[in-house]
Image (cartoon, helix red, strand yellow):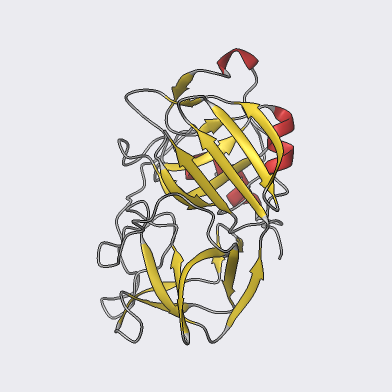
Amino acid sequence: MRKAGGAAPALLAAALLVTGCGGGGRPASAGASPAGGATELPQATTFTTLDDLPRDTSAPTAGSGTVVHPSAATPISAKPGAPAVAELPSTQLKGPTWVPVVESRPGWRRVLLPSRPNGVTGWIPETGLQTARSSQVVKVDLSDRRLALYKAGRKAGTWTVAVGAPKTPTPTGRTFMLASLAPANPTYSPLILPVGAHSATLDTFGGGPGTVAFHGWPSTSVFGKAVTHGCVRVPADALKRLAKVPLGSPVLITD
């Protein structure tokens, strides 16, 4: 499974704008607007909203660890065999799209998607998918303000982190590692690691769609506090470890 990398300079400069954690610039709409005409399907990206698809209602569990990557844009349906209502692109934020499988039926996979609303899922045909398994799971306990990394069911590390403030909480539920961005001119973190979830209270922040992410912070005084706009600020060692977690790996956030 390949990690996201080699992003274009323009993307790296705008890395902070993708997340709900910093940066400045022109606000971006979180709604789905098919480009090029009404006949085109909306793309399942962190910038879009897909209201016509089922939500993930399961308790936050890692599931089987199966993740898939579409070799080309793949149609997404609300039910196996139903008409497509969106497409899952083969790339996200200039890196490969890897999403976790939450349910399987013959010839079909139900996957978590990176769009709003949080927990949105869709069924994609099994044909044309590259399949892999991730043994790594990231767990965030908002009450304890602790992040734990698991490998093959065993705890591989645990850290005290900063989480969302009361008015801009970190969203709970099951999501996944979406991308890895290296800002060209980092102001507070050498890496931004977006996940497939968004702020529940901010439609946009700093010009981005309010995407939640893991990232570092220059001052250790924030760790153990609820002070962010929804992102999870982590120590430098945790950031290095998280950067090695395969894309598509489950992220479980509980309160």
Q: Quadrant of residue 222?
A: top right
User: Is residue 183 something one can see in this rendering?
Assistant: no
At a point 36% along the width and 82% down the height, the residue shown is 80
Q: Is residue 217 above or below residue 94?
A: above
Q: Which residue occupies 36% across, 51% down?
A: 118
| Picture quadrant where residue 249 is located | bottom right
Q: How many marks?
A: 0
Does 160 appear above or below 135?
A: above
Q: Quadrant of the N terminus?
A: bottom right
Q: Is residue 92 left or right of residue 78?
A: right
- Farthest front residue in view: 153
The image position of residue 202, as x and y in percent, is 32, 36
Query: Can you give x and y, in whole percent of width and height, for residue 51 in the image?
Result: 25, 62
The x, y position of residue 147, in whole percent, is 59, 33
Q: Residue at x 36, y 29 (%)?
A: 168
Query: Is residue 88 something that shows in the picture?
Result: yes
